[in-house]
Image (tube, grey):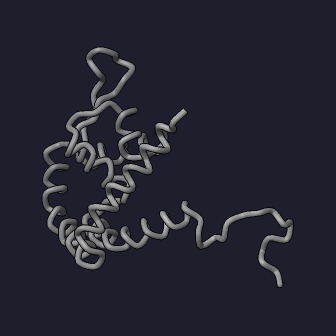
Amino acid sequence: MNDGNEAGVPMRDFSRSLPMALLRAREAVMDRFRPSLRDFGVTEQQWRVLRALYDGGEVETGTLARLCCLLTPSLSRILKHLEATGLVARRPAPSDQRRTLVAVTPAGRALLERRAPFSEAQYRAIEEAFGRERIAALYETLEDLHNALQNPKS
């Protein structure tokens, strides 16, 4: 019987891989949101940028990249497109001309507000399928996991 581990290296079963479990859950969630993102003409990454700016106001690009879990080169391409379509505006930071500040424009705000009911409907459907209390616990658990891995105890 070939278990796929011919070298005999001890390794957990693929079905118990934490990165894969998180990825499968993410894909199941995103399957709910992708249709309306397509309908509104934005990608998942563009939406993350717009949402972060909508909630956080004007932000420096490095901070925005971290907030959206994007690499800086990817963010640069996304911002170029969002700026060309009039959804965001960029300007040099007054304190340091090498840094760039980004903000959502009124057109970007309008897009976010038009899509919000579709997004909220999906959140309600997910809560209905999984349970409101379990969703709240999941948010807390994921935040705890993030904090534990970002700030390991020495």
Q: Is residue 89 above or below residue 119?
A: above
Snapshot quadrant of residue 70: top left
Q: Position of residue 146 (x, y in %)?
A: 43, 47
Q: Residue at x 28, y 79 (%)?
A: 129
User: Which percent across, then down, holds residue 109?
Assistant: 15, 49
State the residue at coordinates (42%, 40%): 76
Looking at the image, is 47 positioned above or below residue 84? below
Residue in the foreground of this view, choosing between 84 and 111? 111
Residue visible at 29% across and 43% down in the picture:
83
Q: Quadrant of the N terminus?
A: bottom right
Residue lying furthest front:
154
Please determine whether, in this image, residue 96 is positioned above or below residue 32.
Answer: above
Q: Is residue 94 left or right of residue 20?
A: left
Q: Residue at x 20, y 37 (%)?
A: 57
The residue furthest top is 95
- At which x and y percent is residue 3? 78, 78
Left or right: 102 in relation to 9: left
Where does residue 126 sit, x and y in percent of width and height?
A: 27, 73
Find the residue positioned furthest to the bottom: 1
The quadrant in which residue 140 appears is: bottom left
